[in-house]
Amino acid sequence: MIRLISKSKLGLILFVIILQATESKQKNSGTQNTNKKKDYNYAVFIDAVSRNFSPKDIRKNNKLLISELEMLNDTLSYCKIEVFTLDGLHYLTYKYFIIDINGKLFFDNCLPYELSRFQNVPTEYLDFYISPYHTISRSALTSASKTVDSLYNVLRPGQNKEKFKIFMCSNIEEMDILSNMTKYYGYVGGFTNMEEKYAVYAYDSPIHKHEFVHLILGKRSGMGYILGEGIPTLYGGVSPQISYYEGRMELQEGYRKALYNFEKLYNREISNAKNNVPSYTIAAVVCEYIRRKFGLDELLALYYNPNINDDNLLVELARKVLLPKNV
């Protein structure tokens, strides 16, 4: 039973929540009526900076400060958490709703509480939730669904085609709040929650092939940026506005001007806070080489291999090149 939450109690309990935050997995049923929820996605950050980390993980390398604590009604409250680096640099502000379940307080993600503003339009392979500030034709949404079908046929032929949720936001701020952020000093045009099988992006076009590829491939067991972002960029471009081949042209221009080299791009020593085209594209270039040299099946096998990461990927490729044909 959800009870009235006093502000003084919230302050005390929130301090405990931050120090002893649950490591619960994200299993949000997507409904705002918490009485009917069977599972809760408590205290899980899903943004691009700290994906899948709980407050307990964040606390290890950051300082957290409660900056705002408000009661919305007798069953629902929210707080904001400022995140600072250990040397005092403020770089994120999170917002979480607070719910009382059988006398215990938990954080809940913002997304289910924001959906009442979004228009739901289902298609064959995508369930769209569209910002009230967007005007998107039905034919464009249908075309996006067909794009998912085509990508499935290329990347996972013969696999069962799952249906995904797409949250189309009108601006970065609207997108950020769906990932529990009210202030973020970087730039992300979209992100995918592969565990919950949804994508969020702030573009006018409903077709975002990069995020579609993320959803189709699902979460990989291994760690690594090159395969994780390279395949979606190779097959889906950097964004709806920038194709992989346009990214290659920008990359070639950067090489011509000596702005970077392969080693710095591969090791992500080039900042992509305002322009992620070079880093995404170099990852796709590596993936294109693997596809041409060994085939798509081998590229996907590397993607799903839990032992492959950015540090050993090139060594593994060299081993495959040098390996005798009969071995």
Image (tube, rainbow, N blue to C red):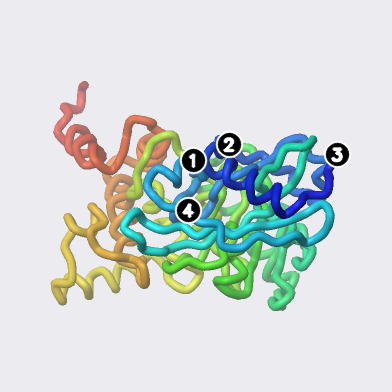
- Residue visible at 54% across and 53% down? 192
Q: Earlier in the sequence, mark 1 or mark 3?
A: 3
Are there few (<14), some (14-19), or many (20+) residues within 10 Å of tag 4?
many
Residue matched to label 4:
64
| Dot 1: element | helix
Are there few (<14), some (14-19), or many (20+) residues within 10 Å of tag 3?
few
Q: CA distance from mark 1 to mark 4?
A: 10 Å
Q: Is residue 286 above or below residue 37?
A: below
Callouts 4 and 2 close, C-beta under 8 Å: no
| Dot 2: element | loop
Q: CA distance from mark 1 to mark 3?
A: 27 Å
Q: Is residue 175 above or below residue 197?
A: below
Are there few (<14), some (14-19), or many (20+) residues within 10 Å of tag 2?
some
Are there few (<14), some (14-19), or many (20+) residues within 10 Å of tag 1?
some
Q: Earlier in the sequence, mark 1 or mark 4?
A: 1
Q: Hey, what amino acid is under mark 4?
A: Leu
Q: Earlier in the sequence, mark 2 or mark 1?
A: 2
Callouts 2 and 1 close, C-beta under 8 Å: yes
Residue matched to label 2:
22
Residue 246 shows up from this direction: no
**Quarter of the N terminus within the rendering:** top right
Q: Which quarter of the figure has residue 312? A: top left
- Residue visible at 14% across and 33% down? 322
Could you say which disc has been placed on residue 243 in the image? none
Residue matched to label 3:
1
* Front position among marks 4 and 2: 4
Name the spot of residue 223 as percent of width and height, x first.
37, 40
